[in-house]
Image: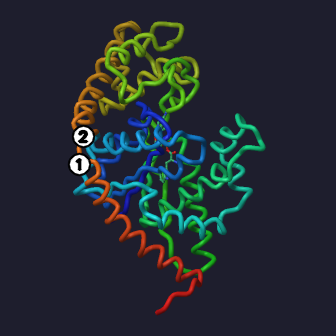
Amino acid sequence: MENVLSGIKPTGQLTLGNYIGALKNFPKYQDTNKVFVFIADLHALTLPIEPEVLRQNTKDIVAFYLACGLDPNKSVIFLQSQVHEHSEINTILENYAYMGELNRMTQFKDKVSKMNEKKIGLGIFTYPVLMAGDIFLYDAKKVPVGEDQKQHVELARDIAIRFNHRYKQDVIVIPEPVISSNGARIMSLSDPTKKMSKSDPKGDIFLKDDLKSVRKKIMSAVTDTGCEVKYDKVNKPGISNLLTIYSALKEITIEEAENEFTGANYGTFKKAVADVVCEVLEKIQTRYNDIINSPYLDEVLEKGKKEASQIAQKTLKRIKNVVGLYEKQ
Ligand code: TYM
């Protein structure tokens, strides 16, 4: 049985992109695999964030995990910062990642290009190493993520291979990214050439948005010239993005979605997209509202922390032993 692990960083409100590209897929593994899903709160510190915002976002993600169908009796749900082995393995792994490869990470380059060079924290540079440690601690083989995280998981894979090679044994399980064929990169509704992201409120749909404004955002989403509902990423990025959203939420192929709208105009199509998005969000929001202020949330985290710690402790011990850190036998 292969272990599955993924996480979300509590840097902002969760978007429909986070849901379709990642969150929606996590519960699918619960009955067949050992699943670890966490909140990457240490990762959230790699860029400036207000303490209260971080705390609130963290609670929110736990509630959304549960609202989207993760079951704490089947999956281990926990906070990264509550399992100190994440920080410890990070210190070890930093010595097996190369500055050249970290420098080549697209997300790092994107983020720092907008920052004052003198004020770039070290954490944003070593970010993928912490991420590799997250994966290694739980012997995760499969890492379901959206397209933007693929490069980080591939780097984790390279580090794992390098580490095993150095010590001539299979110490670390070699992970692989699992990217869904449909919906791995949901684009902004106001600019379909840009990724939908937590930090871009204009073209985003947030899981917490009220449904009226969701409908409004979809009805006014940027579309393209022409009138055919056809998937064509280059010439029709807006319609292609809406087709992706529609088909991913309906669990059908793009082709099946196109067939449903043969002869339909953009208005009719957008209304159908708005209907399905609102239907999905309404269900999630109802469950979220039941959970967000209940003590259940902390119970889930307490249970997750215990379960995750037990496993992380064992893996870290194995790794410390292999690299030669002394312990009484
Ligand atoms: P984060 O918080 O940026 O995003 C969480 C997940 O959502 C996916 N995603 C998207 N998918 C489709 N379309 C979009 N527009 C979109 N935006 C985001 C991301 O690809 C991701 O899967 N570094 C990670 C968190 C992390 C992690 C890990 C993940 C830390 N350690 C170990 C996996 C394994 C992150 O910041 O994701």
What residue is shown with label 2? 291
Q: Give me the disc on residue 296.
A: 1
Indicate the amino acid at tag 2.
Ile
Q: Residue furthest right?
A: 118
Q: Are marks 2 and 1 in contact (CB under 8 Å)?
A: yes
Residue 12 position (above or below residue 310)? above
Q: Give me the disc on residue 124.
A: none
Residue at 66 percent across and 48 percent down: it is 105
Q: What is the spatial separation of the Cα atoms under label 2 and label 1, in whole angstroms?
A: 7 Å
Residue 273: image quadrant is top left
Q: Position of residue 144 (x, y in %)?
A: 43, 49
Left or right of 124 on screen, residue 251: left
Residue 328 position (above or below residue 197)? below
Q: Residue furthest bottom?
A: 329
Left or right of 282 on screen, residue 44: right
Q: Position of residue 211 (x, y in %)?
A: 31, 19
Residue 200 position (above or below residue 62)? above
Q: Position of residue 312 (x, y in %)?
A: 42, 69
Residue 217 position (above or below residue 64)? above
Q: Position of residue 96 (x, y in %)?
A: 65, 68
Helix, strand or loop at label 1? It is: helix
Residue 253: image quadrant is top left
Q: Residues within 10 Å of mark 2 (few under 14, many from 20)?
A: some
Residue at 42 percent across and 15 percent down: it is 217
Indicate the amino acid at tag 1.
Tyr
Q: How is the image coloured?
A: rainbow
Image quarter where the N terminus lies is: bottom left
Residue at 56 percent across and 87 percent down: it is 326
